[in-house]
Image: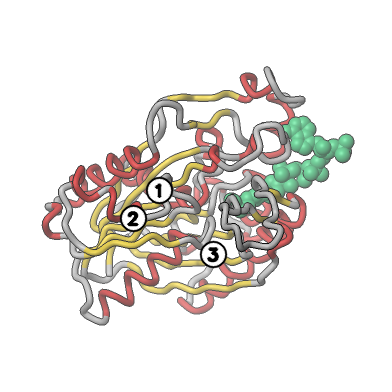
Amino acid sequence: MRILGTGSALPKLTVTNDRLAGFLDTSDEWIATRTGIRERRLLSDETLQSLAETASTRALENAGVAPGEIDFVLVTTVLAETLTPALAMDIQPAVGLKCMGLDLNAGCTGFVAALALAKGMMESGQARRILLVSAEALSRFVDWNDRTTCVLFGDAAAAVVLGEGEGVKAIAFDAEPRREVLCAETPPGNSPFAVDPAPATYLKMAGQEVYKFAVSHSLRDIRAMLDMQGLRPEDVDYYLLHQANLRILEGVRTRLRVDEARFPHDIEFTGNTSSCSVPLLLDVMNRDGRLTPGSRLIFSAFGAGLCTGTAYVEW
Ligand code: ACO
């Protein structure tokens, strides 16, 4: 399987740290120093579905693939606007698709996890061209009174078109189920038979626990992938890590002892866009010419679960 094209879409509203400091006890200095984030894009009068449609259309155009050639759609999202049908079905009329689609949730690891499912489907002959879309709107379920979480996230959609070829070489996962460090609940519903349904909570996170997990596990996963491929850290052109915190990226980069140019980032302008962050950065780099045929890439993501995913890709 290889990546034939990329696309992305961001909400039009840019919210700076200073704007958040207008209603939260926070500051540009605190957020920028602790996370690297300076601004994020947030949904206002658009829908997540419209972003997913635009990202999909751009990816198809970039790949030179007609919508009718897609035979499966995978969407990664923590929470779409509609519980059912899946967002992977809802985007189809606007994008011109007509095929099976389903939504997947592996938190911020979703994109890498879905790559593995797509690869399996392609290798088993189930599909020849797959559209993989990551679409996230965490602004809808963080607590906007909680400065420890809401400042971190942004909304976005990003897509890749996948086809047959030699590009996505290897994918690996790990998991350490630890619900207590990162969790958001859906509303309990109104069943008269449910016993004492607990009130829903917004996203809750033990930031420092997630931070330690992210640095140690990302580093371990990347080293394992390098070993598996017989590569040294400096043999990889770009490490595309989940954009959760610039300090996490720096922690991994310095331990791998590679130069800054190999660890691209856009978290300054997007915040943490969950499963979108890797394909979003990939699209930026594809369009600005940083990726050339044969570029060696490692994708590495971590997220709720907790779970991690790592992929080695030759462009
Ligand atoms: N503005 C000002 N002060 C703040 C803010 C804020 N936005 N948030 C927290 N603080 C305060 C705290 O209340 C605390 O104050 P206190 O010392 O008086 O108690 C102080 O700052 C330090 O808080 P810490 O939580 O220790 O700050 P830390 O340096 O750990 O940074 C952060 C917090 C940025 C959340 C960091 O832990 C982190 O990035 N963790 C990883 C988060 C992550 O990756 N999440 C994504 C996971 S998966 C997914 O993407 C969905």
Q: Is residue 298 left or right of residue 185?
A: left
Q: Residue furthest front?
A: 192
Q: Is residue 179 placed above or below 199 in the rendered structure?
A: below
Query: Which residue is drawn at the image coordinates 74% and 26% (left, top)?
Result: 26
- Residue at 34 percent of width and 68 percent of height: 168
Q: Amino acid at mark 3?
A: Pro
Q: Check residue 82 in the rendering and tell me which mark sits there, or answer none.
A: 1
Q: Is residue 173 above or below residue 200?
A: below
The colour scheme applied to this rendered structure is: secondary structure
Residue to which mark 3 is pinned: 233
- Taking 167 as reference, is 203 left or right? right
Label 3 vs label 2, nearer the camera = 2
- Residue 48 visible in the displayed image: yes
Relative image position of residue 117 (x, y in whole percent): 37, 71
Measuring from the top left, give residue 227's x and y in whole percent.
53, 77
Q: CA distance from mark 1 to mark 2?
A: 7 Å
Quadrant where the N terminus is found in the figure: bottom left
Q: Which mark is residue 85?
A: 2
Task: Please indicate whether residue 158 sits to the left or right of residue 106 in the image.
Answer: left
Residue 55 % position (x, y): 30, 43
Disc 3 C-beta below 8 A from ligand 1: no
Question: Mark 2: which secondary structure?
Answer: loop
Q: Residue 162, can we see it? A: no
Tell me the CA gap for discs 1 and 3: 42 Å
Residue at the spot x=56%, y=75% of the render? 224
Measure the C-alpha gap from mark 3 to mark 2: 43 Å
Q: Which mark is residue 184?
A: none
- Residue at 38% of width from left, 30% of height from top? 46
The residue lying toward the viewer, choosing from 250 and 55, is 55
